[in-house]
Amino acid sequence: MIGSARAVAGPNIALIKYWGNRGDPALRLAANGSISITLDSLWTEVQVTFDESLRADSLRVNDQAADAARLARTHGFLQTIRRFASLECYASVESRTNFPIGAGIASSAAAFAAMAMAAGHAAGLQLELSELSRLARLGSGSACRSIFGGYVEWIAGASDQTSQAEPLFPPNHWELVDLIVLIDEVHKPVGSTEGHALASTSPLQPARLADASRRLDACRRAIRQRDFAALAQVVELDSNMMHAVMLTSTPPLIYWQPATLSVIDRVVRLRQDGAAVCYTIDAGPTVHCLCAPQDADSVSSALAQLKGVQRVLRASPGEGARLVDGAA
Ligand code: PMV
């Protein structure tokens, strides 16, 4: 065996979304900067072992052999690590997660952040967090943000060397709660890798990109000042703009289910009635409802009662990716 390491990372919820790439899609160079919160109670743990006796890369997710598509993506990522580390041998990858995969909770962000850290360490690379962020980005764009904890910004940059995340504020800067409202899925959604490639087909994407730095400024300011009303305004606008691009792509991407709209409607009413809550939706029907801790219980039970809502998970700002025991 050459080396083995284990790392854990949380998913993140984007407050200002990444949607669409520039240039070579394999480099995942975001068309616009983004801001997210790395979440605490959800995690993915990845163990990577490079071993000369292996005849191929292997991937197990929650104790089951992964499907061909997932394995191919992991193999591509490991190829990059092998190139950096001048390694020739294959690796076995074991991934474990405590939340549903592919349900709009950025499972690939947590997985590739943990995989970048574990594989980099197992391959003997001494990488700075900024380098790990760039590496994780090659696996899944949003994974570059999960390397860091708390409130994080992905600087879009202009090249592979400059497109990376950086921490904005630590987790305890503002103890917001993310209520993750899981919704029954009817159709299998188009994955975000395919979705990014469609962004430029929407006539609305140029307008979304042109206004991105204003939204990033507004979001940074709202977080700095812990101004919930300002945050709610920019977060909902940004999510709506991304979904407007999705809806007007060719072919159109419709991630919402009827219950997604019921949740949006209820969140807006709860806010009108005084609760500090707002919604944001990634590439799936799941709705993330950000709220003040004192409103979390009442908002959660109001949303759990809606038709089509499966269950409501809860998370807060958490730590970035880290190595855990078992690292060789
Ligand atoms: O990192 P990807 O390729 O899974 O893309 C993430 C896209 C969104 O979740 C919709 C937005 C974001 O910034 O996380």
Image (spheres, grey):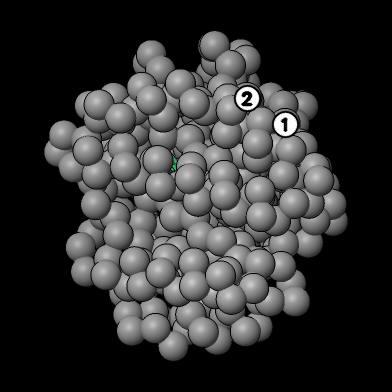
Please give the residue where the numbered disc 2 appears in the rendered image.
155
Residue 21 pos. (x, y %)? 40, 24
Return the disc, 1 or 2, that comes first in the chain's sequence. 2
For the residue marked with disc 1, what is the amino acid?
A: Glu
Q: CA distance from mark 1 to mark 2?
A: 7 Å
Residue 161 visible in the shown view: yes
Task: Tell me if 80 is positioned left or right of 166 in this view.
Answer: left
Q: Nearer the viewer, residue 4 or 132?
A: 132
Residue 193: percent from left, percent from top: 34, 37
Of the pair 164 and 152, the residue shown nearer to us? 152
Q: Contact (CB < 8 A) between labels 1 and 2?
A: yes
Compared to residue 169, the image places residue 86 above or below, namely above
- Residue, disc 1: 166
Q: Closer to the camera, 300 or 210?
A: 210
User: At x 44% / y 88%, what residue is drawn?
Assistant: 305
Residue 125 x/y as whole percent: 71, 26
Circle 1 Cα neighbour tier, 10 Å, few/some/many (<14 / 14–19 / ≥20): many
Residue 199 placement: quadrant? top left
Up-down relation of residue 243 to residue 160 (above or below): below
Determine the residue positioned at 22% across, 35% down: 249
- Can residue 106 be seen? no
Residue that extends furthest to the left in the rendered view of this protein = 251
- Disc 2 residue type? Ile
The secondary element bearing badge 2 is classed as: strand
Residue 278 place in picture, x, y as percent: 56, 61
Q: Is residue 254 above or below residue 310?
A: above
